[in-house]
Image: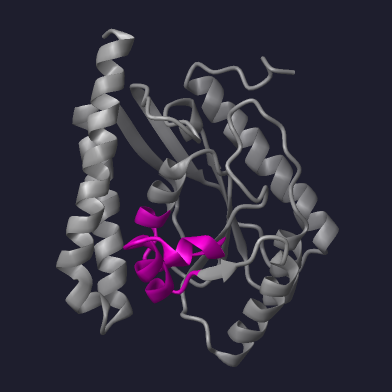
Amino acid sequence: MSYALQWIRSLLFSLLAYVMMVFLGIVFFPWAIVSRRGALAGCHAWCRWIRWSARWMVGLHTEVRGTPPTDEVMIAAKHQSFLDIILIFGAIPAGKFIMKRELMFAPVIGQYALKIGCVPVNRGQRGKAIKKMVADVAKGAQHPGQLIIYPQGTRIAPGIKASYKVGTGVLYEQLGQDCVPVAANVGVFWPRRGIYRKPGLAVVEFLPRIKAGLSKAAFMERLEDEVETASNRLMREAGFDPNAMD
């Protein structure tokens, strides 16, 4: 398939994804406004639609490996593009994210994100936000579910190295919950920016959980090693050498 044709198909897929986001947001809104279950159902429906339409529109197949958690845990994931958000959230029953505060004001996304229990964070005030969230959990003010955090803080393109931020370790230590690491190769096919979607098999993999109780330093070292090692393996499986840019 020529690059130009695939780019056109990718553009149509992207446009239709936004149309369906608005459509499903409206369809589920009456239920979502009165119940978190309705908001979760609407978000899960959109995730399923994205996976289905990506397969036949742009030839992008998706796979979730490992055992997605259903209890209250922290999920610390590799973040390469919006696709890993879709795959991770769609695989768990009650996901909630630590998200940029600006997204609160985005149409549809902002309203649903707050309803499912996402935690808005001001840029440059991540530590303050984590302290508030830990306090909210202790008071029972947070919705139960699986808290998803991206230890590198933002989307990182395949082959680019970026440090893991200590806030994830602080959260792990203070919440006292198990952590489920997640690896990904999705950035090989769905870039962090841009329209083009590459055909292939995009994978996120839920790795064995890291039990609560480790020191912050020991947890961060283990988390980075396991997520990066597994992500590099998945990227090689997809035909991308993560060390090529060294």
Nearer to the camera, 152 or 69:
152
Give the x, y percent position of residue 82: 44, 44
Say whether residue 116 is magenta: yes
Judged left or right of residue 33, residue 220 is right
Query: 229 or 116: which is nearer to us?
Result: 116
In the image, residue 31 sits, relative to residue 148, either above or below, namely below
Residue at 45% in and 52% down: 67
230 or 26, which is in the foreground? Answer: 26
x, y percent for residue 84: 45, 44
Across and down, in percent, residue 74 comes to 58, 64
**83 sits left or right of 132 in the view:** left
Which span is picked out in magenta? 89-118
Q: Quadrant of residue 50?
A: top left
Horizontal side, residue 210 vs residue 86: left or right: right
As drawn, 17 above or below 75: above
Residue at left offset 67%, top offset 29%: 160
Above or below — where is 130 with respect to 108? below
Compared with 176, 168 (above or below) is: above
Quadrant of the drawing holding the C terminus: top right
Q: Is residue 95 magenta?
A: yes
Taking the spot 58% from the left edge, 34% from the top edge, the residue there is: 231
Give the quadrant of residue 136. bottom right
- Residue 28: quadrant of the picture: bottom left
Q: How many marks?
A: 0
User: For this view, does 93 lie left or right of residue 27?
Assistant: right
